[in-house]
Amino acid sequence: MSRFIAYTLAYKGHIYPIIPTLLELKARGHEVLLATGASELAGPEKAGIPVRAAVEETELKLEDWREKNPFKGFKRNSRIMQRQLEPTADDLARIIEEHRPDALVLDPMATGAKIAAEAAGLPWADIAASPVFIPTDPPWPGGLGLAPARGPLARLRDRLLLAVLRRILGQSLPPVNRARADRGLEPLEDPLRLVLGGPMVLGFTAEPFEDARDNWSPAARLIGASVWEPEGELPAWFAEEDDRPLILVVTSSLYQQDEKLVRTAFDAFADQPVRVVATMPSGELPEDVPANARVERFLPHSKVMPHTACAICHGGMGTTGKALASGVPVVAVPFGRDQRDVAARLERSGSGVSLLPAKLTPERLRSAVEEARRRRPGAERVAEGFRQAGGARAAADALEELASGKTR
């Protein structure tokens, strides 16, 4: 049997997808350990995962929402991420020394952890909870919602955009290379290496939600949606008999000033024959709630989805994956980060609708929901694709290969 350590920043969207895989590995007799910020340990520990508090720097919160320009937002986040570089490298090195793992499962944004893994000579897999982190050969310019390059003009487009991305990422390269040098590692020359992942990348997605490609990197393993959430019961009001279609509205667990999504949904459907249920894990809860609506900090979405006609969200892959895994169509309003890529995949796979925040009005949101509900067959096709990809069993198989050194 092998020993696996998962090391992540304290972001729910990066922690929750790997929990089913860790549970599967544990059920097969392997030893597992999850190290992340202390604020996020309770749920995984209650689920049966051995946990360990990581350094405080894993708790850093992104602040791209403070910038209107997405490039400035990216730069702000990059500066924040640099603060966890040395602490996470040292922290994981200590954990490796203590537990002697056979393989690691790492947050793709925890660059320091990757340095520690490489310095220790250990194989690792990146957790690609977002399509942005799934590598192709040649690389693709993630974050813009672009379709795969088909033809010379699109390939030229990608080359030009990758040049811009290299310039932006290049600003983060000096501190990374200093940390690598301190640990006896060669410097990185291509800034894209900061985001391209390790020897293996577990992508929590699959066709037909993912675009069919013939240039996936050999490191990429698409295993379908991975759905996990802390235990919880639905409130008593949810059990009240109500035949009206349910519209579920979900904002980001990592704050990004997306309260507008809930307010607009309430305005859009206040006089409609539907019920609206909103969950807001971050941000201030609205005080004025229509008679046909409810808002909570947390609800177990897996118990809500079977009753849901359509999900409205910010386009985070966690929420989107949960909905589509249940065959529920999605309206995504991408506020930033990787969300344009997720929203674009909804459109291209016919499993939902994308609506830009600048065009978010009650009238447009109603129309988007109506169209998304007509696309339920597409959402059901995606759900089947996710199931066929294998989920936690496929991920555990891949990690067993990684630990044994027999990866393809």
Image (cartoon, rainbow, N blue to C red):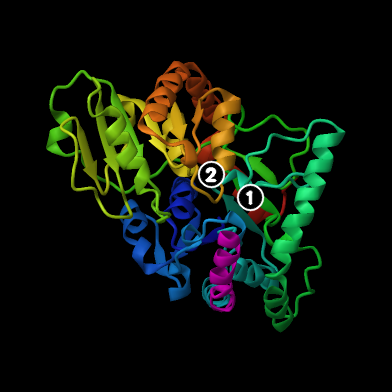
* Residue 311 image-quadrant placement: top left
* Residue 277 image-quadrant placement: top left
Circle 1 residue: 133
Q: Mark 2 Cα within 10 Å, few/some/many (few <14, many 20+)?
A: many
Q: Secondary structure at mark 1?
A: helix
Q: Which residues are magenta?
A: 72-90
Task: Check if residue 85 falls in the magenta segment.
Answer: yes
Circle 2 residue: 339
Residue positioned 38% across, 27% down in the render: 363
- Answer with mark 1 or mark 2, whichever residue precedes in sequence: 1
The answer to whether residue 132 of the structure is visible from this angle is yes
**Image position of 382 (left or right of 160):** left
Task: Give residue 185's position: percent from left, percent from top.
Answer: 76, 75
Q: Main secondary structure of the magenta part?
A: helix
Q: Nearer the viewer, mark 1 or mark 2?
A: 2
Q: Nearer the viewer, residue 382 or 372?
A: 372
Residue positioned 46% across, 51% down in the render: 13
Task: Check if residue 281 falls in the magenta segment.
Answer: no
Q: Mark 1 Cα within 10 Å, few/some/many (few <14, many 20+)?
A: many
Task: Give residue 280's position: percent from left, percent from top.
Answer: 31, 48
Rounded to the nearest angstrom, the CA distance separating label 1 from label 2 is 13 Å
Q: How many marks?
A: 2
Q: Amino acid at mark 1?
A: Phe
Q: Secondary structure at mark 2?
A: helix
Question: In the drawing, what numbered circle is on residue 150?
Answer: none
Q: Nearer the viewer, residue 152 or 124?
A: 152
Task: Give residue 36's position: percent from left, percent from top.
Answer: 44, 65
Instruction: Mark 1 and mark 2 in contact? Answer it, CB < 8 Å.
Output: no
Q: Is residue 226 above or below residue 99?
A: above
* Residue 53 image-quadrant placement: bottom left
